[in-house]
Image: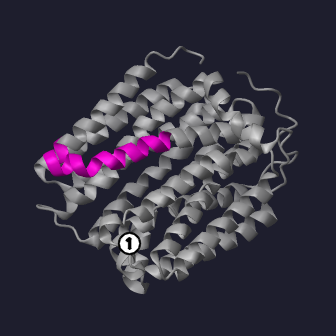
Amino acid sequence: MTAPAETADRPHRPTSPVTFFLLALAAGAGAGNLYYTQPLLPLIAPDIGLDESIGSLVVTLGQIGYILGLLLVVPLGDIVENRRLIASILILAAAGLLLAFFAPTAPLFLAAALMFGVGSVVAQVAVPFAAHLAAPEERGRRVGSVVSGLMTGILLARPVASMIAHWFGWHAVFGLAAAVMLVLAVGLRLTLPERHPHTRTGYFALVGSLPGLWRATPVLRRRAAYQAAMFATFILFWTAVPLLLTGAPFRLDQQGLALFALAGAASVVISPVAGRIADRGWSRAGTVGAFVLAIGGFLATLWGAQVESLGILVAGAVVLDLAVTANLVLGQRALFMLAPELRARLNGLYIAVFFFGGAFGSAIASPLFESHGWPAVTAAALVMLIAAFLYFLTERRGL
């Protein structure tokens, strides 16, 4: 696939850095909505009358809502005026978060989780919009800055939720998040330029085009496969590491886990760097580097667990997160250099596919750790990363 001329698809004036900052903020805050519930389950479940044995339904329904949003809402970015679409998704997220804030029963809270899960896809509309606003020669850097916001939201959501709940209760987390969504909806509606996509396809034809788009775009299939392995190991690590850190010899409490997660957030600095690497035409070398970092980072965590060093574990976590974030930017930049009228759908498919990788990583984390400890977690991560890297080595240059 080749990219057509982009002059008709780009704004006539240079875009202010403030606009990219607001898009990054929306991406981070929107993505964070998916992760607030994870550390709060022991507090939420008793309050809403949800049995602890099925408490993870709160997280699961949020993830299901997110996948539905990726497949059914994100493609609208190719046919609906983007500024209005972003504001509408933020308002939907705010409505779901407010329902969670007030929900007195489990069914209402679960419905809220599904709703704000769908609304969390604002990040995946903001990233293609940033690609549209940026000139081709700076697209990787601008996309990287918005992805930095997205990854910051993912990494900070758990510790921030834990801290707020510790001081003000779990309801405050959702009330504050709803307020942030509403403020961003107004702010972005007022500051973003209009973007009317040129695609005239109807909605059902648009969604129906996704399977054909997947088959016709080898770059999408490959980049989704690479990132699925990366994201699976990322989620595997962050799901299993609390089990390691709360047990002997580390015995961290919730505040200690929050600080550990904050240390991992240092990895967001890599996104603009990865974007610049891609802009210079070094995506292949960058991808090799991302795989090497991911493998090395997980090996470092194994060493840290064996020598009982919290510092080595933190270093391994940061290196792993650097690799996953860099590879995400490299993949999105490659996709956004294709036809502008396909960006929303390409991005939705890309995220949806590697999100299934993340679901797999979370599903195997607890069983692996409980059965054979951190060596089993590391072995599973290495198998996925090495398999994806070997697949990458079969890629033809110029694909």
Q: Position of residue 81 (x, y in %)?
A: 82, 52
Image point 48% across, 59% down: which residue? 61
Assign a secondary structure to mark 1.
helix
* Within-10-Å neighbours for mark 1: few <14, some 14–19, many 20+: some
Q: Is residue 357 magenta?
A: yes
Report the colour scheme: one colour
> Where does the magenta region start and end?
354-375
Q: Can residue 316 be seen in the rendering of this structure? A: no
Of the 4 image quadrants, the one containing the N terminus is top right
Q: Position of residue 390 (x, y in %)?
A: 38, 21
Q: Which residue is mark 1?
A: 40
- Horizontally, residue 31 falls left or right of residue 292, namely right
Q: Main secondary structure of the magenta part?
A: helix
Q: Does residue 166 lie above or below 241 as drawn?
A: below
User: So how many labels did they put on this image?
Assistant: 1
Image point 59% across, 70% down: which residue? 96
Of the 4 image quadrants, the one containing the C terminus is top right
